[in-house]
Amino acid sequence: MGLNPESEIRGTDTFSSRGLSGEHFEPKQEYEFPNDTDERIETILSGIGNGAQKSVIFLNASSQRDIPVGYSGLKNSFMAATDGSWDIHPTTIRGLIQDSIVPTGMVNKENNGGISINEDGREYGEPLAKFMIRLAGTSNFSLAEVFSETHKTPEAKHRNPYTIFRLLELLPNSTEEEKSANELAKEIGVSLPPIGRRLKELQKLGLATYDSVDNELPEGKFGYTVERDFDDETPRSIRGLVTQFVSQAIRELQEENPEGFLDIDSIHTKAIELGAQAKTREVTGLILAGLANEGYIKSGNYETTGMLSRSRLTQDGEKLVENFIRPIRIALTDTVEGKNLRDTWREIPWQHYSPRAIQMHREKPGKAQDLPAAELDAAILDIIAQRPEVRSGEINTMLGRKNVNVNLLRLLAQGKIERIRKGKATLWRTTSSHEKLQETG
């Protein structure tokens, strides 16, 4: 059963507990909000905390209390909460709800199309969303800049927003001894390359310092440094059994010496120890060359072991930890202090802060290239709907990406957009059938 178009024509976009034929629909709950504090932090940050638009959508749904609300109704309330500064497309809302908000376990998704906030959403999600909107509306950076990456690889233990949260928690302040990236990676329980990338990003935002010191190594020593986390995705080179042994050898050697340099002899020896059968050093070299071509490792003549990094919070980073990181952890506990903090945040007049929070999000959207495919497709659709006959280059610029052609072709195949020619220019616009679909929810 689809959405009730009459409810949207009336402007309420709420849903009866009965469908068009009068049958009763029970709430459909597929996810559960966790009990563990750290799991709650990860759920909140990934679901509604790494983008002001998510928090606004969630709070607009919560304002209806137990009454399910649909995409068009959420668009209208979103426009009202942001002073009309973002004419968000219903497709964008649909994508954010399905891919981010519903998996939090804080909403009920009705069989007839609406969503409603459940008990956990009212107890934890609502006060946390208000708190995050206030912070986003009073800061000189957006939460998306800090926590924008939502995705998690199959091998990873946690989503990126939680890893960044823990990194900020563990970074020393100005009165404490600096920590290396290796130390931080071990404390969080992740491999080194992602931590190095996060530290560089936090440094660019002015939230952390990230310095390196070089140690001497015999001049002219040829070898490799790891440039990209093997867990990000499976390299094309790692297909055969021998290449798997070589990649595993690199992983284990990196764990033993995370900030150092790997030579071909140590990699080859380790691969043999792991079970590579009677393969020559030259074969190992060819595999390493393939990994280097894919950007996973970098080869050269090294005079140093690489970086022995030193990092700590800046003054702005310390303020973020004091005003955001620590309160979030307390508020997501079931202690008296946590409940009192949530009760205090319930009184925040979030609509006062939401226009600027959304403005900051649009000006500083973070790393659009790290969005899950569904969210990126929704963002592209939103741009095309607002700017008919837009060029792909303009979409790239607005999203900070190099190429969205794959996404455009996918949306074209789905019948959501169409391609038109004007002279030599290729332009994009939404299809009439897709626009009609969105008008009816």
Image (cartoon, grey):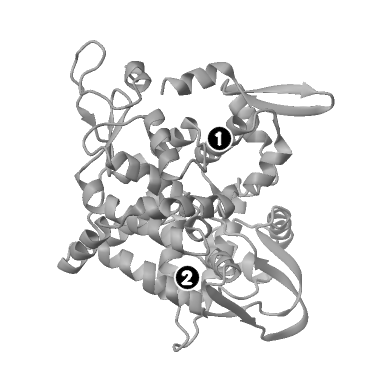
Quarter of the image where one finds residue 419? top right
Identify which amino acid the numbered label 1 is placed on.
Asp
Picture residue at 34% right of the left edge, 21% below the top: 10
User: Observer-nearest residue: 191 or 248?
Assistant: 191
Identify which amino acid the numbered label 2 is placed on.
Ala
Picture residue at 39% right of the left edge, 54% below the top: 352
Quarter of the image that includes the N terminus: top left
What residue does disc 1 label?
382
Q: CA distance from mark 1 to mark 2?
A: 37 Å
Q: From the viewer's perspective, is the residue at label 1 or at label 2 nearer?
A: 1
Question: Of all residues shown, which one is farthest toward the right?
Answer: 424
In this picture, is 420 found above or below 318?
Answer: above
Picture residue at 62% right of the left edge, 49% below the top: 235
User: Observer-nearest residue: 428 or 306?
Assistant: 428
Left or right, residue 352 beside residue 213: left
Label 1 close to label 2 by CB (< 8 Å)? no
Q: Does residue 207 show up?
A: yes
Left or right, residue 344 beside residue 11: left
Left or right, residue 146 beside residue 98: right
Quarter of the image that includes the C terminus: top left
Q: Position of residue 275 (x, y in %)?
A: 54, 58
In this picture, is 41 found above or below 184?
Answer: above
- Marks counted in the figure total 2
Quarter of the image where one finds residue 20? top left
Q: Position of residue 431 (x, y in %)?
A: 59, 20
**Which SS class for mark 1?**
helix
Give neighbour class at mark 1: few <14, some 14-19, many 20+ (Cα, 10 Å): some
What residue does disc 2 label?
185
Q: Which mark is residue 38?
A: none
Q: Does residue 234 show up?
A: no
In this picture, is 385 found above or below 259?
Answer: above
